[in-house]
Image (cartoon, rainbow, N blue to C red):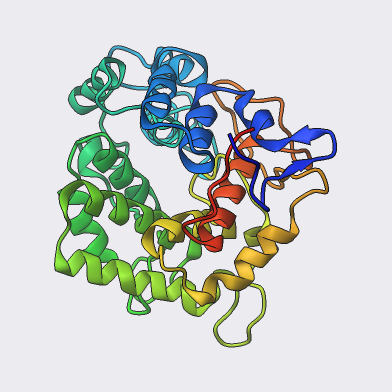
Amino acid sequence: MGTSSEHAATFPGVDVIAYLLDSDPAIRWQVLRDLTDASSDEVAAERARVATEGWGARLLAEQAEDGYWDGGVYRPGWVDEERPFYDAWTATHPSLQLLREFGLDPVSPEAKRAIGRVREGARWDHAGERYFDGEVESCINGGALANAAYFGEGGDRIVETLLATRLPDGGWNCWDEDGTSRSSFHSTICALEGLWEWEQATGGTAVATAARVEAEEYLLERRLMRRLSTGELIDPRFTMPSFPMRWYYDVLRALDYFRHARPERDNRCAEAVELIRGKQLPFGLWKLELTHQGPTLFDMEAEHEGFPSRWITLRALRVLTWWAGPTAMITRS
């Protein structure tokens, strides 16, 4: 096959594509699809392995027959409710988010079994709602909607809740109680991802699409990271790529969203794209800059803050490939 693109060239000592492919099926199939000229059959064969090998298989094995991961939906069953701000990532909701990010094929027998268990047994901690009907907080509902749509479980009720809780400035804030709060980048990106996934699965509605586009404008007007009033950086952590993202916002997450939602490339993303481009290391990789602390069911990779990351490199490269245009396909030697 041909040579690598300008974004993922073979750097001294590191063949970036080979490095990315030397990993778990959850990463490999996305590299093949997004960064190489691999055939659709090759991509599908690698994706199928997510259900039976590596992190995907291991995460599926952690689910109990009652549908739950670690005894709870948003929080694991062992977390003391007197610690409301304690983050733990072992329960059902973050586990489904990870399976979606891994790209588990929704039509695989393993996915159907796991999702059937969730549908029948999992109930939200808030008021006992069925998982795929959502709860009340927009940042949680955004992720739940993305999960529901991705795994073929609808999500219409969650859409209704999201539309009803959108704020006057166009976005969402899960801390809002009376509709007067300023939108949160964290909540807004979660809601956007959910609405986009739902539209792709169902065709959407004119009302939901209009709300999504207005929420995108909320982020774009702020160049994905700056205050509208002063142009100041809102939070330095927005510039620090993370994975898994959980409910947190960063510019790489936003760009990964906009490469789908705005394939024509909106110039208001340019500063964020250049920020990500500038983080590329001399040998072609990107670092994991931020980890959202809390217990996990297992470690995916021996990747730590400040060290090169396959997940971050994959996501950065496909953003740069999108930004370079439709002909910027990365091929393997």
Q: Position of residue 86 (x, y in %)?
A: 56, 39
327 horizontally vs 6: left or right: left
Name the quadrant of the N terminus.
Answer: top right
Rendered residue at 67%/66% (across/down): 274
* Closer to the camera in the image, 164 or 57: 57
Q: Nearer the viewer, residue 323 or 158?
A: 323
Residue 208 visible here: yes
In percent of width and height, residue 253 lies at 53, 54
Q: Identify whether 214 is placed above or below 124.
A: below
In the rendered image, the residue lying farthest to the front is 1
Instruction: Give how far across and how far down residue 172 sits, in percent.
Output: 38, 65
- Residue 302: image x %, image y %? 71, 25
Q: Is residue 2 left or right of residue 302?
A: left
Nearer to the camera, 25 or 179: 25
Quadrant of the image occupied by residue 120: top left
Quadrant for the C terminus in the image = top right
Q: Residue at x 42, y 25 (%)?
A: 42
